[in-house]
Image (cartoon, rainbow, N blue to C red):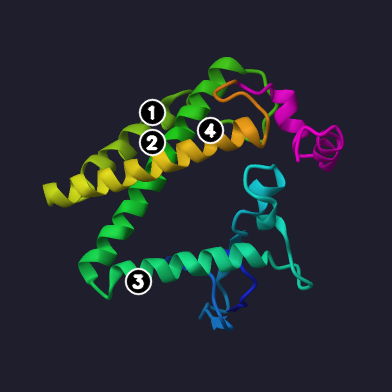
């Protein structure tokens, strides 16, 4: 199987008779081949950088722009620039690369904890809301996920100083993103920060007409 440079991030799962292999591919500049078994079962998850959030007006509209090949070109350039910045700051140092990877891991693990909390809040406040999947065993699995992920964050490194630096960098990233989000929600999306959105409105956001109406009324610029 080959991955083409279309600006997407791919997660490929290859299920064989005795093992499961996972491949991840970011932005590439040429065709990239993956060696898979002929009798194996494969499935793929594809992420297009920023396109979905731009569609919902959570990012600048330029992230949703595509070229004639339907590639989100700005998202591709953004990811490529991020990779170059990562390479510059790592300076070919194994320790620095490890530090940045661990910092990114903590960032995502905190996001996963928030996702588990969302499940608990959603189940408490809207127990009868329509959903495609319901987590079994009540709050058991979300709580296990929160505790397990928190344990990994607290023990992300055996070096106390490196661990503290990882937490500081992650915290700084969340502060910057928090400020950006608050300003964007208030002045661009024209919504109140920290105010809950009715479920019906969230479901309406899946329809293109929702954005057309808001733009025609001047709610979004």
Q: Residue at x 76, y 41 (%)?
A: 221
**Whole-percent x and y of residue 203?**
74, 32
The answer to which of marks 3 and 1 sits earlier in the sequence is 3
Q: Disc 2 vs disc 1: Cβ atoms closer than 8 Å? A: yes
Location of residue 77 with respect to 179 vertically, above or below:
below
Does the magenta portion include 159? no
Q: CA distance from mark 3 to mark 4?
A: 30 Å
- In screen coordinates, is 198 left or right of 173? right
Name the residue that disc number 4 marks: 182
Residue 88's disc number: 3
Assign a secondary structure to mark 2. Answer: helix
Mark 3 against mark 1, which lies toward the viewer? 3
The answer to which of marks 3 and 4 sits earlier in the sequence is 3
Residue 159's disc number: none
Q: CA distance from mark 3 to mark 1?
A: 39 Å
Residue 145's disc number: 2
């Amino acid at each position: 199987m080959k991955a083409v440079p279309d600006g997407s991030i791919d997660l490929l799962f290859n299920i064989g008779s005795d093992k499961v292999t996972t491949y991840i591919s970011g932005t590439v500049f040429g065709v990239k081949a993956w060696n898979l078994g002929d009798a194996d079962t494969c499935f793929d998850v594809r992420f297009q950088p920023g396109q979905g959030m731009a569609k919902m007006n959570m990012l600048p509209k330029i992230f949703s722009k595509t070229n004639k090949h339907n590639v989100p070109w700005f998202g591709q350039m953004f990811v490529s620039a991020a990779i170059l910045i990562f390479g510059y700051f790592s300076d070919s140092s194994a320790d620095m690369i490890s530090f940045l990877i661990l910092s990114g891991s903590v960032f995502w693990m905190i996001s996963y904890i928030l996702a588990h909390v969302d499940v608990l809040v959603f189940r408490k406040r809207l127990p009868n809301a329509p959903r495609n999947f319901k987590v079994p065993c009540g709050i058991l699995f979300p709580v296990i996920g929160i505790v397990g992920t928190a344990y990994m964050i607290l023990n992300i490194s055996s070096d106390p100083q490196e661990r503290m630096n990882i937490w500081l960098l992650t915290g700084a990233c969340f502060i910057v993103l928090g400020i950006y989000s608050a300003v964007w929600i208030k002045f661009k999306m024209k919504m109140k920060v920290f105010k809950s959105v009715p479920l019906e409105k969230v479901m309406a956001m899946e329809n293109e007409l929702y954005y057309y109406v808001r733009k025609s009324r001047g709610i979004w610029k």
